[in-house]
Image: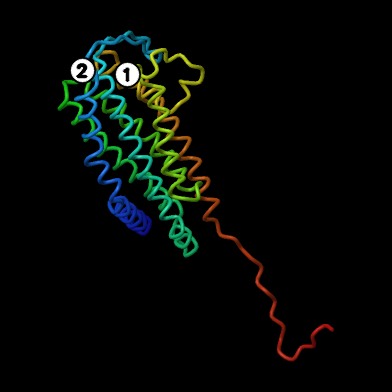
Amino acid sequence: MRHHWTAFTVALGFTLTGHLRNRLAVTMTAFFIPTWIYVVRATALDKSIAFHSSALGTEVTASMNRTIQISSALHAVTVIAGFMMFMATFNARDMDQRLVLAGYPRGHLLAAKLVALLVITAVLTCYSTGLLLLSWPLTQPGAVAAALAAAILAYGGLGLLAGFLLRGELEGFFAVVMTTLIDVGMQSPVSNPAGDQAGLDALPLYGPAQAALVSAFTHTPSLTCSARALTWFTATSALAALVFHLRTRRRHHPMPTLEPAGSPHPS
């Protein structure tokens, strides 16, 4: 048991160190989230809009300015989480392969990545929720935080899967940015007022986006709505585990048979 715990903690330490060495991601966390929220607050119109939450069956009337701030916060944290998980997974692929071939427990390496995602989720959730609270008093700050956390987990899982599947850094960065941009745009009541397109409820941010928007302005319970994104997190994590297992499996090759010295060779 002690051996397994040591193997896990060592793997977790290296994984977290890899995230901290990602200077672009750390810079984005420190400056991109508050800058994005502040720019929206300073430039977006402050008129009231009304929209319907199909997931919660609630009519909401809110400021357009504040509504866009919620969508911007969701976009910022999902981009950062997806990018961080992709880069950490992508950069560690060769080392993971060597470690598994050397006998390191495969499950401990994967568990370390998932626990690191939980740490990232906690940091990004607390930071972004605090920045929104500085902008205006959220009606249900805890529920908004839960929605942000669910969104981060969903896109963190997608970043983890992309890190095992994609072949280049540019591909991964482009995939994360474009996927989050489209998803947030489709879920925003400002850019997509109708919000009734077929298949919209299948997107990762459907539950968290609606839960965050409703919780920010009303007292409607929304935790079950946020939890819809956990299906994406579970599915992508399971697929990532499968790909990781296939990529790091040991391939046994038959050993050549050595002939004794002096034996005749076939002509």
Q: Residue furthest bottom?
A: 262
Neighbour class for label 1 at 10 Å: few (<14), some, many (≥20)? many
Amino acid on which disc 1 is placed: Ser
250 to the left or right of 28: right
SS at mark 2 in the image: loop
The picture places residue 86, in percent across and down from the top left corner, at 41, 46
As drawn, 177 above or below 201: below
Amino acid on which disc 2 is placed: Thr
Q: Toward the viewer: 235 or 49?
A: 49
Q: Toward the viewer: 106 or 53?
A: 53
The picture places residue 137, in percent across and down from the top left corner, at 16, 20
Q: Which mark is residue 171?
A: none
Residue at position x 39%, y 36% in the image: 155
As drawn, 215 above or below 147: above
Q: Which mark is residue 139?
A: 2
Residue at position x 28%, y 29% in the image: 73
2 to the left or right of 101: left
Q: Which residue corresponds to mark 1?
A: 222
Q: Residue furthest front?
A: 43
Q: Residue furthest right?
A: 267
The picture places residue 96, in percent across and down from the top left corner, at 44, 57
SS at mark 1 in the image: loop
